[in-house]
Image: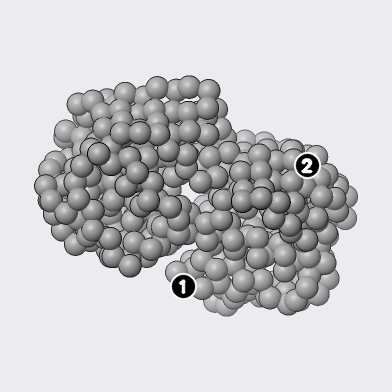
Amino acid sequence: MDITLPPGRVAGALTPPCSKSYAQRALAASLLSEETSVLHNVEFCDDTRSALRCIEALGAGVERIDEHTLSVRGGLRPRGGVLRVGESGLAARLFTPIAALWHETLRIEGEKSLMQRPMAMMTDPLRQLGARAVDCDGRLPFEVCGPLRGGTAEVDGSVSSQFVTGLLLALPLAAEDTTLRVRDAVSTPYLDMTVDTAARFGVEICHNDYTEFYIPGGQRYRGTDFAIEGDWSAAAMLLVAGATAGEVTVRNVSVLSRQADTVVCQALVRAGASVIDEPRSVTAARRELRAFEFDATHCPDLFPALAALAAAAEGVSVLHGTSRLVHKESNRAEAIREEYGKLGIEVDLAEENVMRIRGGAVRPAVVSSHGDHRMAMSLAVAALRADGPVTIEGAECVAKSYPDFFRDLQHICL
């Protein structure tokens, strides 16, 4: 699906979808409880649907109470031999260790861009912890057979924190205590979200500066009521739209959240935007924007939003952490360079791990999403400042995280 967007100003208030990162963690924890949990504020993007499919395949009973509320009766009792995770990298790396709790072989299958994303970091740690694990040249499909017994394992955390999250949620149910030694942990705020989710279900996880995690075995997940907060990755796009083209208030978010992308507020302030923080909302408004410097190593999903912000700022902005962008839905650094170049914005990747973006006028163009939901949203925000219409090819990919993005954007366009 292609979408053509006219330039324009924005003004208004929006509520983004729930955090899919919290939603997937809460669904996994609900599965691992033998009790019933109630999850509130659930919205069904593609990634959340993938996690829902996984917990049902693994034995959870799910009842939809209303449009945004689920009742989940937990219990790990797989109904088949295959988990289909769609294109969700988190679901793949989260539910593989959980599947390894089971004593029979389970196969994890993905599709499209996920089939090229690295999964080799899962194999050796699962074997060290007592499971049989077989990958396909370091990628999906993946087969596991448990049960995980616990013990000690070394984990490479340099590519993603998602597999560490899966281990942290699975291992409290192992028979033995576990010590995980994590090398070069990245995206550590996402690990904070994992520890927080486990605690809300009554499970204890301890760590020493993200390098060593201690997980007591033989624990039990309690059923709980869990209200899922708004998604800061989506909020970041909306706030950048306000900062570059008008004023936007994002509801059901708090800067006190453990989500990594709350730091977009720091980038907005550095760029000169007006940012107003209230208990249940954040507002960003346009001011004269200036070039800024920002390290997004631990929040790589922010890069597309930061690119739209930098394109509207006077001068050359410097973003650090591009090494984290290779194994996303697209090679996001190259995708940003290529597509923003079509819009007349110079993006320089000559320096290792650094992106430099020279702000300026945005020209009309036909651009590609590269099948990447965050690229599609970023280009749509940039299009607000264009001298004429911008057409985004493959815009339907926003369904991965924010199915109503274009409808919401149109709602606030003047």
* Three-letter residue code for mark 2: Thr
In the picture, measured across the screen, residue 121 lies left or right of residue 145, that is left
Where disc 2 sits, the SS reads loop
SS for callout 1:
helix
Return the residue at label 1: 112
Eyeballing the image, is 184 above or below 275?
below
Residue at the disc numbered 2: 224
The numbered mark, 2 or 1, whose residue comes first in the sequence reads 1
**What colouring style does the render use?**
one colour
* Label 1 packing within 10 angstroms: few (<14), some (14-19), many (20+): few
Q: Give the amino acid at mark 1.
A: Lys
In the image, residue 270 above or below residue 66 = above
Give coordinates of residue 168: x percent, y percent.
70, 49
Residue 228 spot, x, y in % from top left: 62, 41
Q: Please tell me which residue is depicted at 45% across the width and 56% down the height of the picture.
A: 403
Q: Residue 365, image x and y in percent?
A: 15, 58
Q: Nearer the viewer, mark 2 or mark 1?
A: 2
